[in-house]
Amino acid sequence: MAEKRLVVTFGEKSKLIVLDTNDIANTIEKIRLKFNIDGNCKLLAKCEGVSKFVDIDIDDEDDVYVLQHCSELLVSVEQKVTESESSVYDEESLDESLTADSEASISSPSAHSTPRAKHYKKDLVLDIDQLLNDNPKGESILEEYAANNTLTPQSRRNLVNIVTSGLVKTCRTPYYPLKHEKTSCALAIVERFPSLKNKYSKTGYEHFFSDKGRQSGYIQDRLKNLRRYIPESAKKRTSTANTSNELPAKQMELGGIVVEPLPDENATKLASFCKRAAPDLKKDIVKAMADIHGNFSKWILEEAPTAYEVLQEYPRFKDIDELVNQHFRIKFSSDISKQLLLKWESVIAPVIMKLAASTTTADVHHLYGECHVDVSEELNSEVLAMYSFLLLVLFLPSTPRNRGSQKQTMKLLIDFQPIGVVLEEYLLQKKNQTQPYLLCIGTKKAPSQFFIIVDSHAIPCQENIVSAIDKLFKLHYVFNIHYAQQLRMFYMFMDSVVYGIVPMNTDTLPNKIIELNAAIEATSTEA
């Protein structure tokens, strides 16, 4: 219970009342009894150092904070008025009357009736261009957007920092803007920079600010950082509720097409044939595996075997390349299955490289410089594809960013080993590694072979990075393996932006993925 002794004013009467400011409903009831108020009443609170009173909304957590820290509290009686009567109170005259009343520290029922309180909540108006022109970094943001029709993550961060600083200076409660003020700020950003809008959401600005559930978004994150530097006494306590959005532990839980299994006797015969048939019967093996897809998927879901056990029962996944793709295609459709091969080199990789060229973050700058160490060298599409996958890992970190951890995270996607490495010895060293990843024999610019390494097995891939990543991603679904936590954001990008398995309008997608997708779409539209 948060008890607070406060002088409460109703009309010309003032009383010292002990209030439980965590419970607005109880507070209102206690005030009604103290002043013998017949009917509903509303509260208007003002914090020390602020000239205006705030209409306390029982459902607004920011208003609750104002109530908990207010220095003056006024009470008004809710009265019914006609539309014509309420319309005479415009926002400007209301602000003046509230300011005058706060200086006198008294109120009357007629001076602070509910209609005035309702009209007080007006949208915040921010001049984005003016804020940017007044800031040294603003000009480069405007120039970059004019040239590219999008912003790099770093420029977007600068934009949010500048605009949020403007919000803090103009909001009613310092460092704690109300929801409608943050909403107005987010709306102003996407109206000024339309390509930053998330066209898959209802409003398009939720990644900048959303009040669904717990408040979130870039603006909210920036406000939290700014509050770290204000006095402890001025800080608002926050809930410790866990609101993290995790992917399903197993990828098959995301859905797809369910194929009816064959009778057990038929399925057992076909599985035995696939296991023992000679390699020259490849077409028959592929067909048989397609026929028992329903039985295979049912076994995977019900028995939850390890990757090692799957490869023991169905060893042809190791020597027939198209089996992983076939099972994925049956589950999700041909159209979904080919999305990475269609999009990566022609649409997504160029945008990632373009963003990397304008990014000064140390790890991104270092990797991009490694790719372009010789400016006269014309890079082929294979090299650009390789570096764009690695840069994507850096653009979408799932763990706190530091140089060492990012290098290790990239190795969880692709481990580079020199030509001549003995595969059997390598597998012995990695025998405790159960999470699938790519082994690339060769270098980033000159790869020779690719293998998927999982549970002491090496599954050969085609000799190009896009096909290898495609097979690695699909293996997670076919074998029902959860994503590595350090690569969670990378695979969520693949799920949503690339393959479209997870809809872009879902509330669980992180803001960085929404932002990167907006940049890709803006660049594609421009082209």
Image (cartoon, grey):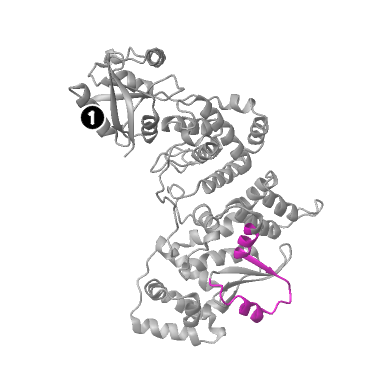
| Residue 403, image x, y percentages | 66, 55
In this orientation, does residue 467 appear?
no
52 lies above or below 448: above
Horizontally, residue 381 falls left or right of residue 487, namely: right
- Could you tell me which secondary element the residue under label 1 belongs to? helix
Q: Which residues are magenta?
A: 405-434
Residue 145 on the magenta span: no
| Residue 267, image x, y percentages | 38, 81
365 lies above or below 383: above
In the depicted view, which residue is nearer to us: 118 or 388? 118
337 lies above or below 25: below
| Residue 323, image x, y percentages | 51, 73
In this orientation, does residue 405 appear?
yes
Horizontally, residue 267 falls left or right of residue 24, namely: right
| Residue 468, image x, y percentages | 60, 66
Residue 431 on the magenta span: yes
In the depicted view, which residue is nearer to us: 199 or 405? 405
Horizontally, residue 128 falls left or right of residue 92, namely: right
- Could you tell me the amino acid type at mark 1? Lys
Is the C terminus in the top left, top right, bottom left or bottom right quadrant?
A: top right
Residue placed under numbered mark 1 in the picture = 30
